[in-house]
Image: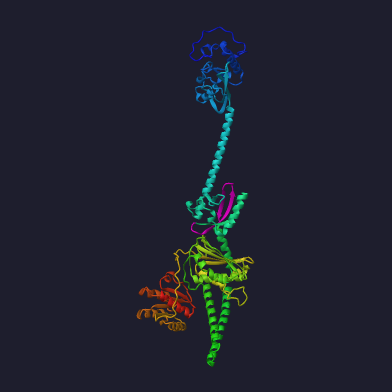
């Protein structure tokens, strides 16, 4: 092989070797007649055997081939190869790098590897060849096989070209199909994202350990949580405590079987109330996806319809039941009082004192029972005077626990399921405790003194009136449920349960006013009560109390011991009932007060204006002449803002304003009351 730049020898007349390009064809003839003496290969007859053999093999190949030989990479090609480089007048004898200058950056590294003795076939990626200026482009793969001379050194390489246009086109079609599939996936992802963003149902994705992974805008809109507060939050912290066990069981089954689950449960709103959802869920092996429909309104509507059915009892029947029960109970009580007084009068006339105290105790017991009966009737009629104040609901329930345990008895178990962060309420504490005691007493009777009572509290937000347009308006409420596992109630008994004097107990086992007291107290407190029960499965009494936004006192004031006697403090007593006023005046005088009395508002204001200052004013709320005790109190405090006033009443057509009762030096007592309680309350107020 002659290196580039070596002087050429003079041309020689030679005869072709019979093994080279025989039989001659058109391309073979062109190779034989080509003046190779102008190239580094020299004259054809002088080619080494290794080169001639390579050219013979190349010429017989069905593929476009070229032998590239020598340091200057001189090209000897067959017919098919010539067509690939039609832009050149004649490719024979040209340098390979010049012939393929347009593709040399891609082909050069493989050429050098072939010259180093490495054989390669390069089809990925194929190269695009333009055969002529106006010709069709082809996609081709290239082979590079090293060629050795007689000494075993690499003298060149065999360049083979295989057209892969069809494969490239097929690959292009596959690529287009793949891209089309990718576009379909992108559309599906976009549609899914659109559903995620625009759905009115709550959607969330939860990890297997029940941490919130993501939620859609509807979830945040319904529950009101800011995203930063619930990111990676344990979802069970938002589930209602009573529903958590059911949720954990459902999730365990879902993770195990990966089947869709349907579950109704409650999630806590950021304000503290709960929303009911009907969930469908599926687990894909990585995340649990749940879609929930807000059914809070549906459940409220069902509750309203249920309550409407229970309120269909005849009004006249209720009135008749009330009149008959009242007459029966009062006859019993008056008989005890009248009989005791008759025997007492006879003993006094005869000068005999034996058993006098017994007759007094019988009469006093009957009076106390009559007072209790009156309180319950007033509670049912919603005319019971109340002294409500803001309460921490859970704290008040816990403080009432000893009282409730006493009402339940030793063999009843009391369980609490209280909301974690309940809203505050505004209630009269003694009447609230009285209602709970009545419910616990009924539960003990239903369980035959052996059973379970569960008290639950939960924040509720009503989105519509409950149970109907005439009931509670939409707003925030605290629900209290008292549930027992006793013998339950029949449907016809539930419909009449709140009627006064209605009872399923044997004669002599109560007034039948316990539930009516609860119903009246809840209604007078601005709430609503209803009963749900199934025979042999238990009863649940539910109450809704309005949310109170006023601040709740942190601690209660310690109870102060009251002295037994007054110390001559001046007291103005205002009441239009002559006999009651006379009794109160006499008792208060005996307890050390200096009492001035008045029968109406005008007289009371005149005495207050003209007499010396009074340490305490005791006034009935209902006074004759159209001027109430509330107005009397306001008029007095316009003259003396620090005046202490004790209201007494047995009937409140309109409740006393909360602002009035909250003023320092103000208290309220409900008639009937004992004279001792009245005097003790007056002394306590004077000590404050």
Q: Work out which residue is located at the far right of the displayed protein and give it.
A: 536
Q: Quadrant of residue 46?
A: top right
Q: Work out which residue is located at the far front of the displayed protein and give it.
A: 151
Residue 143 within the segment the image draws in magenta: no
The residue nearer to you, when weighing 216 against 565, is: 565
Q: Is residue 111 above or below residue 431?
A: above
Q: Position of residue 130 (x, y in %)?
A: 53, 24
The magenta-colored residue range is 270-294
Q: Work out which residue is located at the far bottom of the displayed protein and give it.
A: 350
Q: The C terminus appears in which quarter of the rendering? A: bottom left
The residue nearer to you, when weighing 532 against 432, is: 432
- At horizontal 50% and vertical 15% (from top left) the residue drawn is 3
Q: Position of residue 525 (x, y in %)?
A: 49, 68
**Dominant secondary structure, magenta:** strand
Q: Quadrant of residue 297?
A: bottom right
The residue nearer to you, when weighing 149 against 349, is: 149
Q: Quadrant of residue 618?
A: bottom left
Question: In the rendered image, is residue 23 in sight?
Answer: no
Residue 277 within the segment the image draws in magenta: yes
Question: In the rendered image, is residue 50 in sight?
Answer: yes
Q: Is residue 138 above or below residue 221?
A: above
Q: Position of residue 653 (x, y in %)?
A: 47, 73
Q: Is residue 159 above or below residue 373?
A: above
Q: Position of residue 177 (x, y in %)?
A: 57, 35
Figure disc tally: 0
* Left or right position of 309 against 98: right
Q: How is the image coloured?
A: rainbow
């Amino acid at each position: 092989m002659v290196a580039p730049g070596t002087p050429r020898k003079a041309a020689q007349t030679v005869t072709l070797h019979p093994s080279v390009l025989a039989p001659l064809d058109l391309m073979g003839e062109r190779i034989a007649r080509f003046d190779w003496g102008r190239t580094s290969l020299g004259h054809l007859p002088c080619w080494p055997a290794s080169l001639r053999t390579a050219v013979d093999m190349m010429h017989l190949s069905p593929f476009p081939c070229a032998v590239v030989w020598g340091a200057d990479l001189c090209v000897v090609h067959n017919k098919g190869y010539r067509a690939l480089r039609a832009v050149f007048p004649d490719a024979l004898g040209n340098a390979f790098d010049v012939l393929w200058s347009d593709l040399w950056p891609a082909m050069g590294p493989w050429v050098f590897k072939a010259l180093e003795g490495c054989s390669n076939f390069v089809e990925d990626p194929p190269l695009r060849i333009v055969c002529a200026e106006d010709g069709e482009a082809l996609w081709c793969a290239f082979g590079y096989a090293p060629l050795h001379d007689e000494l075993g050194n690499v003298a060149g390489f065999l360049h083979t070209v295989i057209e892969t246009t069809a494969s490239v086109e097929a690959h292009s079609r596959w690529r287009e199909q793949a891209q089309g599939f990718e576009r379909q996936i992108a559309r599906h992802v976009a549609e899914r994202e659109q559903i995620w963003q625009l759905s009115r149902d709550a959607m969330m994705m939860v990890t297997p350990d029940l941490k919130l992974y993501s939620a859609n805008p509807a979830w945040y809109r319904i529950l009101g949580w800011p995203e930063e507060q619930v990111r990676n939050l344990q979802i069970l912290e938002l589930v209602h405590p009573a529903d958590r066990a059911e949720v954990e069981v459902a999730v365990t089954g879902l993770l195990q079987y990966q089947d869709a689950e349907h579950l109704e449960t409650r999630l806590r709103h950021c304000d503290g109330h709960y929303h009911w959802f009907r969930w469908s869920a599926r687990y894909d092996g990585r995340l649990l996806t749940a879609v929930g429909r807000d059914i809070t309104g549906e459940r409220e509507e069902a509750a309203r319809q249920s309550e409407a059915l229970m309120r269909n009892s005849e009004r006249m029947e209720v009135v008749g039941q009330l009149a008959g029960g009242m007459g029966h109970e009062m006859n019993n009580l008056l008989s005890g009082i009248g009989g005791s007084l008759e025997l007492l009068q006879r003993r006094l006339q005869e000068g005999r004192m034996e058993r006098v105290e017994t007759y007094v105790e019988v009469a006093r017991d009957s009076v106390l029972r009559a007072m209790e009966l009156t309180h319950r009737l007033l509670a049912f009629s919603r005319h019971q005077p109340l002294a409500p104040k803001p309460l921490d609901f859970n704290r008040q329930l816990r403080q009432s626990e000893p009282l409730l345990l006493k009402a339940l008895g030793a063999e009843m178990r009391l369980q609490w399921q209280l909301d974690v962060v309940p809203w505050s309420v505004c209630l009269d504490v003694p009447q609230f405790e009285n209602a709970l005691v009545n419910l616990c007493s009924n539960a003990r009777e239903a369980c035959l003194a052996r059973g379970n009572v569960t008290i639950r509290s939960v924040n509720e937000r009503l989105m519509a009136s409950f149970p109907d347009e005439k009931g509670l308006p939409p707003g925030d409420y605290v629900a209290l449920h008292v549930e027992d596992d006793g013998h339950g109630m029949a449907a016809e008994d539930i419909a009449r349960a709140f009627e006064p004097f209605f009872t399923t107990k044997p004669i002599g086992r109560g007034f039948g006013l316990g539930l009516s007291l609860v119903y009246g107290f809840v209604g007078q407190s601005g709430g609503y009560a209803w009963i749900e029960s199934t025979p042999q499965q238990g009863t649940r009494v539910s109450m809704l109390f309005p949310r109170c936004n006023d601040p709740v006192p942190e601690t209660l004031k310690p109870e102060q011991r009251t002295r037994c006697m007054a110390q001559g403090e001046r007291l103005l007593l205002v009441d239009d009932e002559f006999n009651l006023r006379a009794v109160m005046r006499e008792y208060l005088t005996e307890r050390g007060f200096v009492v001035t009395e008045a029968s109406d508002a005008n007289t009371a204001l005149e005495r207050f204006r003209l007499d010396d200052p009074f340490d305490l004013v005791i006034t009935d709320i209902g006074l004759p002449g159209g001027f109430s005790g509330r107005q009397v109190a306001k008029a007095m405090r316009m003259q003396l803002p620090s005046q202490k006033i004790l209201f007494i009443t047995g009937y409140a057509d309109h409740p006393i304003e909360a602002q009035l009762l909250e003023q320092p030096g103000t208290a309220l007592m409900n008639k009937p009351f004992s004279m001792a309680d009245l005097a003790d309350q007056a002394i306590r107020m004077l000590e404050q």
